Image (cartoon, helix red, strand yellow):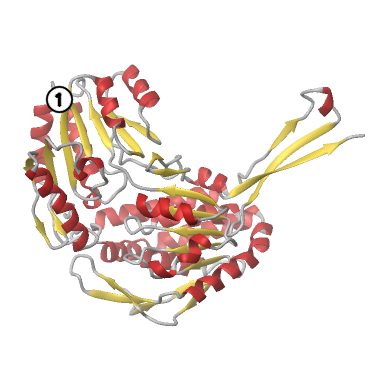
Amino acid sequence: MLADTYPFYLANEPEQPNADLEVRDKYSGEVVTRVAMAAEADIDRAIGRAVAAAAPMRSMKAYERQAVLQHCVKRFTERAEELAQTLCIEAGKPIKDSRGEVSRLIDTFRIAAEEAVRLYGEVLPMDISPRGAAYTGMWKRVPIGPCSFISPFNFPLNLAAHKVAPAIAAGCPFVLKPASLTPLGALIIGETLAETDLPPGAFSILPCRREGARLFTEDDRLNLLSFTGSPEVGWSLKAKAGRKKVVLELGGNAACIVDQDIRDDFLEDAVARLVVGAFYQSGQSCIGVQRVLAHESIYEDLKAQLIAATEALVAGDPRQEETFIGPMISEKEAQRLHGWIEEAVGAGATLLCGGQRDGAMLQATLLEGVDPRLDLSCKEAFGPVAILEPFSDFEAALDRVNDSDFGLQAGVFTRDLYKAQSAWDRLEVGGVIVGDVPSWRIDHMPYGGVKDSGLGREGIRWAIEDMTEVRLLAIRTP
C-alpha cells in the first residue's frame, strides 16, 4: 500500500532530491518506505516562495479558500482507509484509533471550510465623546502572512490539520515541518493540496533533521510560529523566535477527579471513560489521564473496577481490530517510562497492574501511592500509565490538581452543579471537562493550556484569530 519513496512539497510541488529519511513500522521495526529530507537551502527557498505567495493568498476570495478546503474534505473521505492504514503503520496507532483520527482530520478541514467565509469585522462607534463625533470606525481581520508550523508524532494527521486548515481559511501561506518519526500523513495532506488551485508558494511540507530546522523558528520573514510538542522544546523555540507571534501547544500530566456521588452505573461509566482516557493510543496524548483522584468513599470500588478493565485490554499488533494497546513510538520512549515506573515502585509505590515492557510495547499500568515529587507524577508520562490516589475533600482535590507545572485540561466526574462550577472557576487549566475525562476534545472548541502547557489556543476559529490581525479604518466627515 505504501509507495517506495515519498517526495517533500516545496512551493506546492513535489521534489525528490533524496530518500534519506527511513520510516519504520512502529510495531515490527522494519523500514517500510523512505522520504525525501529537506536541507536548509530548501527551507530557505520555501520561505522565500511563501513570502511571494502572501499577496496572492491574501487576494483569494473567501469562496475560493473554502473550495480548496472542501476539496480536501472530499479527497480525505475517498482515501480514508488508506490514510488510516498508513497512520497505523507509521505511528503504531491501533487501527480503530487510526480511523478515528482520520475522521477528525476530515472534521477539521470541514470546520475550516465553514469558517473561511466567516472572517467578520465590526462597525466601531467613535462618538463616545465630542472629539470623535465626526468619525466613523470599522475593523476587519487580515492575514498575518507567512507562517511556520511544527507538528508532532502522536496525531500526525489531525494536529497538522489544526495548523494547515485554518491557515488556508485565513489566507496565510505556510511552511510545515512534520515529525520525522511520522511524516507520511502530512505529505499526503500536501499531495492533496497540490491538486488544488492554491497560488504557487502557498504551502511547503518539509521533513528535515532537527539541526536543519533553524529557519522554521528564527527566520524573520515568517510572522507566526505554531509549535506542538514537548515543553522543553517549545519554550526554547519561543526564546529564539524573535518578533514573530508564537503559539505553543505543549504537554501535560492531566488529572481527573471522581467525586463521591459517582456510584453504581455512573461509576461503571466513569471507569470505562478513564480506561479510554489513560490508555487510548498507548497513552501518547498530552491530555491523557495521568492522575486519577477518587473520593475515599468510592476509592476501593473504583480501583477494583479499573484494574479489571485495564487488565482486559488487548495489546499487540495495531493492525488487528481487537488491539487497544499498540507500541509506543520507539523503544527508547518505552524504556524511559518503564524506568519511571521502576523508580516509583522502588520509592514505595504499589504496582496495581501492568508494569512490564517488551521492546516498544509497555503494558497498560496502574499504580497508587506514588510520591508526588517523582517524575511519574510531576512530569508528563506520555505513555500507558495512570496513578490513583484517594481524597476526602473536593476543594482540596482541586488544589491537588493545581499542584502541577502543567495546565492543559482536567476532567471532573460529579453530579453536583456547584462543584462543577467551582472546578471551572478554580482549576488552572485551559479546559474543564465535566462528566468525562480530560482526554476529550472536539475540533472546533478552543484548545490549549496555561503554565508549562502552552500559549494561545487552537481550534479553527481561535487559530484563525492568531493567523490574522485586526486592521482599523477610521473615516472623518468634515
| Mark 1 crowd level (few <14, some 14–19, many ≥20, 10 Å Cα) | few
| 123 with respect to 259 (left or right) | right
Dividing the picture into quarters, in which one does residue 345 lie?
top left
Give the position of the N terminus as an image quadrant: bottom left
Percent coordinates x, y for residue 444 in the rendering? 46, 43
The location of residue 476, given as percent across then percent down, is: 86, 36
Image point 39% across, 66% down: which residue? 210
Of residues 154 and 317, the one drawn nearer to the viewer in this rendering: 154
> Looking at this rendering, what residue extends furthest in the right direction?
478
136 sits left or right of 260 in the view: right
Residue 105 visible in the displayed image: no
Q: Secondary structure at mark 1?
A: helix
Residue 300 in which image quadrant: top left
User: Which of 331 and 29 lies nearest the eye of the viewer?
Assistant: 331
State the residue lying farthest toward the bottom. Answer: 17
- Quadrant position of the C terminus in the picture: top right
Which quarter of the picture shows residue 21? bottom left
Q: Which residue is mark 1?
A: 264
Tell whether 434 sits left or right of 207: left
Q: How many numbered callouts?
A: 1
Where is 254 relative to 413, above or below? below
Q: Is residue 50 above or below residue 142?
A: below
Q: Residue at x 39, y 42 (%)?
A: 442
- Across and down, in percent, residue 245 comes to 55, 50
Front-most of 337 and 83? Answer: 337
Q: Can you give x and y, in whole percent of width and height, for residue 121 in the image?
A: 67, 40
Q: Type of residue at label 1? A: Asp
Name the residue located 32 percent from the left edge and 74 percent from the top edge. Answer: 2
- Residue 427 vertical placement versus 210 (above, below): above
